Image (spheres, rainbow, N blue to C red):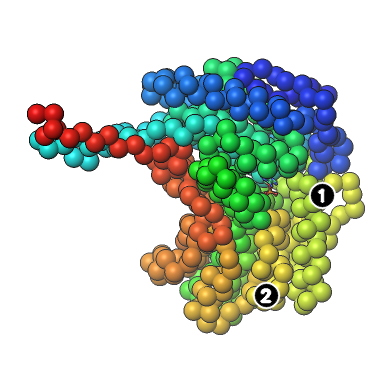
Amino acid sequence: MADYGLIINGEKIATTDSFGVINPATEEIVGQCPIATKEQLDDAVNAAAEAFKSWSKVSDEERVAACGKIAEAIGNHAEELATLLTLEQGKPLSGAQFEIGGAGAWAGFTGGLSLPDKVIQDDDKARIVQTRKPVGVVGSITPWNFPLMIGIWHVVPAIRTGNTAIIKPSPYTPLSTLRMVEIINEVLPPGVLNCVAGTDDLGQWMTSHPGIQKIIFTGSIPTGKKVMSSSADSLKRLTLELGGNDAGVVLDDADPAKIARGIIHGAFMNNGQVCAALKRLYVPESIYDELCGQLVEAAQGVKMGNGMDEGVQQGPLANKMQYEKVLDLLADAKANGGRVLCGGEAPDGPGYFLPYTIVADVTDGMRIVNEEQFGPLLPIIKYTDLDDAISSANGLEVGLGGSVWSSDAERGSAVAAQLECGTAWVNQHGGIAPNIPFGGVKCSGIGVEFGEEGLAEYTTIQIVNVNKSAAA
Ligand code: NAD
């Protein structure tokens, strides 16, 4: 079994305590996760603060080159990282390779973004220039669904803009991040990127640590609220990417045969463990039965199993906590009249497996609709009035993504514009890219990632305002 350590100031650091990380396909231990102490977090903060003194001053070209080297280093270790990711997260090896390819691509693209100075006024009275400065030490706290890609989303823009960073992975999937940061440290100066791991307490220590100036957090809404309150004392900058419960609204002009595959992809990608997955589908009565039939057909034939096995397309849920939550929501739906169209039965263990499950005849207010399932469950709700469906789609506290499905793109866009969410897709669900700002409204988050707007979140504005008339 490989030996994992914290990565602080470019060194691999052993800890006294550790815990076993479980492979969700076999329930066996993949490796031991080191548990950082408070003192080790202090060491990481001090290393990052020391490195900030020089990293914040290196040239833009050097930082761009560093991002390119990060992308290259990830690419050079893609197979090793993909295998580790599959072992601890459960996703099929092809999905892990996709995630690592995405991480590298994001790192490269983000490296090429820039936030040039803006001259606000330059005349005989004054020269006023707006610059963007790094905030200092950035703390990154990541979830378990896409640990490596989300880790890169957090730390590369931080490094690109002259900050230094400390990443803390989820206790469910820490090993691949520890190894990725070790690899990245081969191409970065010591202290620029550090990794601490442990239990949830460590996240709380980070959010209240006076030496960390910004937190970028991706995770659930309840934890996001704790992050916000714990960061208040030191008034940290925050980007919060939180949970969603994205609605898909099908219009009565949609062709069920044409949209079924896109809906299944949007709902079940990464086993439904996607913040912006399609998590509740509103379907007009006139095409309800036909679309239900097409969705079941599109969900058939998916090979479920251990992600390391050849040809597997669907792995287990990533951990026992999530598995039990999803089974509980399914049981509640069944008990309250939900009609299971496909899937619906968990095979005998080991492993946290549940096939793609579509549940029809559910209504707003049922737990499977109102709570974020974050698993391979898709509830279908019948509607008769489009305004009612839009108001249901907007009726929850969340607003991450949403989608509209229609044969008429213009009509679809007009309905999409009425959805209260950060991204409203038409005839697709979940498409993201490094040049498109992404974030939630309402309780789904604060701030955005990606693009120049995402980069700007790692900076503060400084205005240099020169009074020319006084100098003359
Ligand atoms: P989680 O909130 O349980 O944990 C996220 C991270 O927070 C973990 O690293 C955890 O150790 C840490 N943490 C736990 N308690 C903490 C505390 N008190 N202070 C600071 N950190 C603490 O979420 P999860 O179960 O890992 O991830 C699933 C959730 O993440 C879902 O709700 C999903 O929608 C959301 N998510 C959102 C996005 C997005 O971009 N909006 C992306 C992926 C996942």
The amino acid pointed to by label 2 is: Gly
The amino acid pointed to by label 1 is: Lys
Asked whether, in this view, residue 355 is left or right of residue 154, the answer is right
Vertical placement of 134 versus 241: above or below? above
Asked whether, in this view, residue 373 is left or right of residue 441, the answer is right
Q: Residue 405 appears at what percent x and percent y?
A: 50, 66
**Label 2: how many residues lie within 10 Å, few (<14), some (14-19) or many (20+)?**
few
Q: Residue furthest bottom?
A: 384
Residue shown at the point (77%, 29%) measured from the top left: 34
Residue beneath label 2, please? 365
Q: Quadrant of residue 312?
A: top right
Vertical placement of 460 versus 272: above or below? above
Q: Residue 408 appears at what percent x and percent y?
A: 42, 68
Which label is found at residue 320? 1
Callout 1 touching callout 2 (CB < 8 Å)? no
Regarding residue 332, the answer to whether it shows in the image is yes
Residue shown at the point (48%, 67%) measured from the top left: 419
Which label is found at residue 130? none
Q: Which label's residue is closer to the chain start, 1 or 2?
A: 1
